[in-house]
Structure formats: C-alpha cells, structure tokens
Amino acid sequence: MADMFANALAYEDMMGRWSARLAPLFADFAQIKDGGRVLDVGCGTGSLVRTVAAMAPRSEIVGFDPAQPFIDYARAQFADSRISFDRANAMDLPYPAASFDYAVSLLVLMFIPQPEKAASEMRRVTRAGGTVAAYTWDRDGLEMTSAFWEEAAKMDPNAEARSERPRHSNREGQLAALWHKAGLERIDGLHTQVDIGIEEGLKHESSIHCDELMSLSKSSLTSFIGSLSPAKQALPDRALAFALGLTSDMFPEGA
C-alpha cells in the first residue's frame, strides 16, 4: 500500500480519473459555500482543492497530506495565494480548534489506520455549525474487486492480506457510525456511481480494466495470480465471469 502513495505522478495517473469526477459531486453534497475556510483532509494531488477553488473563489483552502511527494506535486499545481498545502497527520492535526468552516475528505478515510481519531480531529478543527464530510469507496459495490479476492481467499487464507483492500469506513453504515461516535449531528449520506468507460480505463498501466466501473490493482493481482498453480489460475476467471454475468461456454471444458 505504501507504494501507492510514494509516486505522485503514478497516483495521479491511476486515481486522478476517479477523483476529478467525484470531487464536484462531493463538494456539492458538502454544500461548500463561497467565503468559508476549507480543510482538505488527505488532499493527495489536489483534485478536491481544485474543485473547491473553482466553486468558491473567495474561500481560503488548506490541503494536507502525510505523503511529501503529494504535497510537492500539489504545491506545483497552484499559484493562488488563498491555497496552501501542509504535510500533516489526520490523526493529530496541527490546526487550532474551530479554525475551519469545512473539513472534508475525498477517498482517504478508509486508508487511515485509526479513523476514529481522524473523525474526532476533523470535528475539533471545525467551528460549531460547520460541516465535516467524507467520501469513501463502497467496498461491497466494487463488484470486480470483491469477486476476485473472495475467490482468492478460498484458495489462499493469506490472499485478503495481500489484496491491499481497505478494511474500514467503506461499507454501508460505517461512516455514519464514525460520525456518531465523533459527536456529530444531522448526519446525511450520498451514494454515487461514476462510469469511466473502456477507452479511458485501458490507458492506465497500473490497473487491469474489467468493466466500465472498476479496475483491479495490477501489482497485487498479478503477484497473487503468479503464485497459483496453472490448475488454480482458472478459478479467479470464473469468479469474475460470474460477477460480469458471462456465460460458462467462454471457458474450455474442465478449466
């Protein structure tokens, strides 16, 4: 997982296509108003910052991330004096209490080791009446990934650990529970699906395109497949075929 956050250009190439499409939907959901002070928790390469800057031209925006390559990349993308970037830890924010109107996080919470601490810190730095919001992957809704790794776990008990799939804050009800525990009020939710398309999906060497919605991490997938015997390599194929609704006549007899 650490490799995913070590190279800003590679991350932007793989994940930027998702973040750029999700950021406007998320910002609208968070109802970010122009003139407020906004904190982007785990800003990555700056997709959400860019969206907020465009929709709220008078707002001050602070983005932070624990990965220095991301901070360096993001700083190089923006020349606006109202936008700044810090290297920081979401579980121990270096900002005063009640210093932001919005604390928002796009596709980050599921990677934070202690999301309860992050949620508590997001609440602490947000003023009374402000907004704390996060957007995460729906683990159960990622059909290709789920089908592959569920089948893999049947063959190898260690497969789940090798999958690099986040294990919290990404299933129905988990974010709401996190916000309740942090003491937030008026909790609401949003469920979205964003299509990328085959032509766009095939551009990215860091993932294997499966359908118009999901790609699988190439490094973790190929590492696992390479560890299987030839006889077992057909089993993940069948799992993915089932998830895609493909027919069994696509496979050789006995495979």
Image (cartoon, helix red, strand yellow):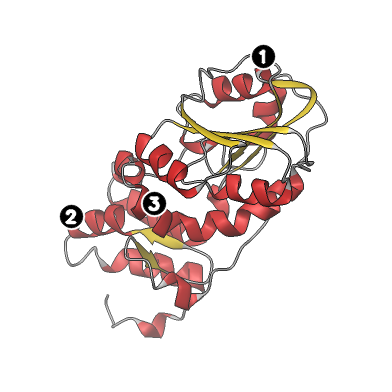
Residue 131 location in percent, x, y? 75, 31
Left or right, 115 with respect to 220, comes to: right
- Work out which quarter of the rendered image holds the C terminus and state it: bottom left
Three-letter code for the amino acid on which mark 2 is drawn: Ser
Numbered circles on residues, count: 3
Earlier residue among tags 3 and 1: 3
The residue pinned by badge 2 equals 227
Residue 165 location in percent, x, y? 42, 45
- Work out which quarter of the rendered image holds the N terminus and state it: top left
Label 3 to label 1: alpha-carbon separation: 32 Å
Please rate how many residues cluster around mark 3, counting C-alpha atoms within 10 Å: few if below 14, some from 14 to 19, many from 20.
Answer: some
The quarter holding residue 169 reads top right
Mark yes or no: residue 138 visible: no
The residue pinned by badge 1 equals 97
Q: Nearer the viewer, mark 2 or mark 3?
A: 3
Label 2 to label 3: alpha-carbon separation: 26 Å
Please rate how many residues cluster around mark 2, counting C-alpha atoms within 10 Å: few if below 14, some from 14 to 19, many from 20.
Answer: few
52 vs 123, nearest the viewer: 52
Three-letter code for the amino acid on which mark 3 is drawn: Tyr
Using the image, tell me which numbered label, if any, was put on residue 11.
Answer: 3
Earlier residue among tags 2 and 3: 3
Residue 119 location in percent, x, y? 61, 25
Name the residue at 46% across, 25% down.
Answer: 88
SS category of the residue bearing label 2:
loop
Q: Are marks 2 and 1 in contact (CB under 8 Å)?
A: no
